[in-house]
Image (cartoon, rainbow, N blue to C red):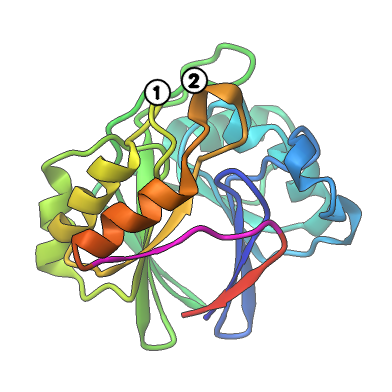
Amino acid sequence: MQLTYLGHSCFMLQTAGKTLIFDPFIKSNPLAASISFDALTADYILVSHGHEDHTADLIALAQQTGAKVIANWEIHAWLNKHGVTNTHPMNIGGKWMFDFGTVNMVFAAHSSSMPDGTYGGTAAGFVIESDGKAIYYAGDSALTNDMKIIGAKYMLDAALLPIGDNFTMDYQDACEAALWVNCNHVIAMHFDTFGFIKVNHEQAQAYFTANSKILTLPTIGGTITI
């Protein structure tokens, strides 16, 4: 698996010959100015919830790439009404085998509404099983006991967790979440984009090291091999 950080909570995952993009928020993110949106390609787009900092570029990217959008029922229906019909609806606790592997939709403790105020259903995360690896994308979840179910069910190779606080977990809770999902390697997201979610990198790294966990603070445009 090759994981490229596109800023905020947006990642591009290349696995089993397919390209997946999570929560597209690029053109509206000044920190992601180095990313060429027009050059992006994708086979699938996964959407954790409806907030604008996760869906601002969703319709544009779906139209540009022709990718199939994987999301909950409410976001699927909203997209259909807005002309994006190549969608696959899911809900919490469900899984589906795609041509790259299995997507498991899991609970995220967070709110959800679409940019126009439409109800966005229950916020979600995803466990992706592909190429003999498994990663957990938590979306904007707070620390929740449901993460212990993930730790019991899956052998994760990496966990993508928010660390910015205010709207999501902070890095201390993310470190606890790593324990609960039974994964030593955390790839951080949802940090530094806005003033509300600025993080002290040195303190976060030191906290994880003190708790025998690995924290990767990705750089925008950088790629991580999992």
Q: Amino acid at mark 1?
A: Asn
Mark 1–mark 2 contact, CB under 8 Å? no
Q: Which residue is mark 2?
A: 113
Residue 191: where, in percent of width, then height? 52, 40
Residue 209 shows in the view: yes
Magenta highlight: main SS:
loop
Q: Nearer the viewer, residue 26 or 67?
A: 26
* Residue 218 sits inside the magenta stretch: yes
Residue 200: where, in percent of width, then height? 47, 41
Q: CA distance from mark 1 to mark 2?
A: 18 Å
Residue 175: where, in percent of width, then height? 24, 52
Residue 183, image quadrant = bottom left
Residue 138 shows in the view: no
User: Label 2: few (<14), some or many (≥20) within 10 Å?
Assistant: some
Identity of the residue drawn at 52% across and 44% down: 47
* Residue 186 image label: none
Q: Amino acid at mark 2?
A: Ser
* Residue 166 image label: 1
Q: Nearer the viewer, residue 161 or 66?
A: 161
Does residue 160 appear to the left or right of 2 in the view shown?
A: left
Residue 68, image quadrant = bottom right
Does residue 63 appear to the left or right of 165 in the view shown?
A: right
Residue range in magenta is 213-220
Give the vertical position of 164 relative to 33 (above or below): above
Does residue 117 appear to the left or right of 94 in the view shown?
A: right
In the structure shown, which secondary structural element does the residue marked by tag 1 occupy?
A: loop
Give the vertical position of 60 relative to 183 (above or below): above
* Residue 32 sits inside the magenta stretch: no
